[in-house]
Amino acid sequence: VWGASDAPVRAYMDVDLSTDLNALLPLVAPLISGHSDVAIGSRLAGGSRVVRGAKREVISRSYNLILRGSLAARFSDAQCGFKAVRGEVAERLLPLVEDSGWFFDTELLVVAERAGLRIHEVPVDWVDDPDSRVDIVATALEDLRGVWRVGRALASGALPLG
């Protein structure tokens, strides 16, 4: 959808509405002003208020540690389903992003960061959806494959980030 849009700012949030919509204006404002290129909601940033179980908390924090260790990621929360990007940035980045599943947002952020783009993080109020039907094991394995693929592409210079 982002690729077909001509909007100056493109945003999405997870369908479960776990993120409080009061964070929408702080998410898009730095993009509209030109301060940032990409903006993300973060459940791990100071000031965020999060309600979720210990299992998901450990998985989330572990995943972000893996990203920091393997891909040198500097953003705090790759998979909070609350992101926005400036339109012209989306047009540059989307052709470089291969994944169209759960790893999409992580890959987009890694590519943006490695391309030297400015990523703004917004602390969010977030409440875990108790009815989530995400298969955590399958999703985690796919994400690890994605981390391996992107890491390999970065190491070999296969991603044209200049």
Image (cartoon, rainbow, N blue to C red):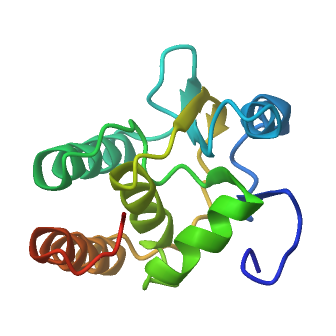
Q: Quadrant of the rendered structure where residue 85 is? A: bottom right
- Name the image quarter holding the N terminus: bottom right
* Extreme-top residue of the structure: 47
- Residue 112's place in the image compared with 98, above or below, is above
Please state the horizontal and vertical placement of residue 110, each as a whole percent of the image.
36, 57
- The residue under the point 78% across, 39% down is 28
Left or right: residue 73 versus residue 56 is left
- Name the image quarter holding the C terminus: bottom left
Please state the horizontal and vertical placement of residue 140, each as a whole percent of the image.
28, 70
Left or right: residue 99 versus residue 126 is left
- Residue 12's place in the image compared with 156, above or below, is above
Left or right: residue 81 versus residue 7 is left
- Residue 10's place in the image compared with 43, above or below, is below
- The residue under the point 39% across, 55% down is 115
Q: Quadrant of the rendered structure where residue 153 is? A: bottom left
Residue 14 seen by the camera: no
- Residue 56's place in the image compared with 6, above or below, is above
Residue 70 seen by the camera: yes
- The residue under the point 36% across, 41% down is 57
Q: Give the total of numbered labels.
A: 0
In the depicted view, which residue is nearer to us: 140 or 69? 69
* Extreme-front residue of the structure: 162
- The residue under the point 27% across, 42% down is 58
Please state the horizontal and vertical placement of residue 128, each as a whole percent of the image.
59, 46
